[in-house]
Amino acid sequence: MQNINNNTQGIIDIEQTKSDRTLNTIIAIAGVGLATSQIASAVILAQPNQ
């Protein structure tokens, strides 16, 4: 019975790790997108008016 509990907990931990990794990837992608938009905005605002 203890082995079944340990196996189940191991599976739960693995799935949680996968979920956490996916969330971290999504957050990283969103951060890169925000940084890129900030750079683009700064470049646009830095151009002289014509």
Image: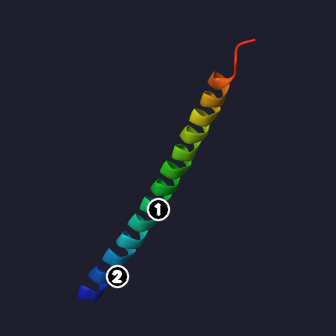
Given the current orientation, which residue lies at the most extreme left position?
Answer: 2
Amino acid marked by disc 1: Arg
Q: Is residue 6 above or below residue 21?
A: below
Front-most of residues 26 and 2: 26
In this rendering, does residue 3 appear at all? yes
- How busy is the neighbourhood of tag 1: few (under 14 within 10 Å), some, or many (20 plus)? few
Residue 23: where, in percent of width, then height?
46, 54
- Crowd tier of the residue under label 2, counting other residues whose Cα lies within 10 Å: few below 14, some 14–19, many 20 or above: few
Give the image location of residue 9, x and y in percent. 31, 75
| Residue placed most toward the observer, 6 or 43 | 43
Q: Check disc 2 and give the amino acid type.
A: Asn
Left or right of 1 on screen, residue 12:
right
| Direction right: furthest residue | 50
- From the top left corner, tell me how far across and down residue 2 is, in percent: 23, 86
Residue that mark 2 sits on: 7
Q: Earlier in the sequence, mark 1 or mark 2?
A: 2
Q: Quadrant of the N terminus?
A: bottom left
Q: Quadrant of residue 37?
A: top right
Relative side of 13 to 21, left or right: left
Residue on which the image places disc 1: 21
In the picture, the quarter occupied by the C terminus is top right
Between the residue at mark 1 and the residue at mark 2, the CA separation in whole angstroms equals 21 Å
Seen at 51% across and 45% down, the residue is: 31
Question: Could you tell me which residue is drawn at 50 percent across and 58 percent down?
Answer: 22
Which residue is situated farthest in the front direction here?
48
Q: Is residue 1 visible?
A: no
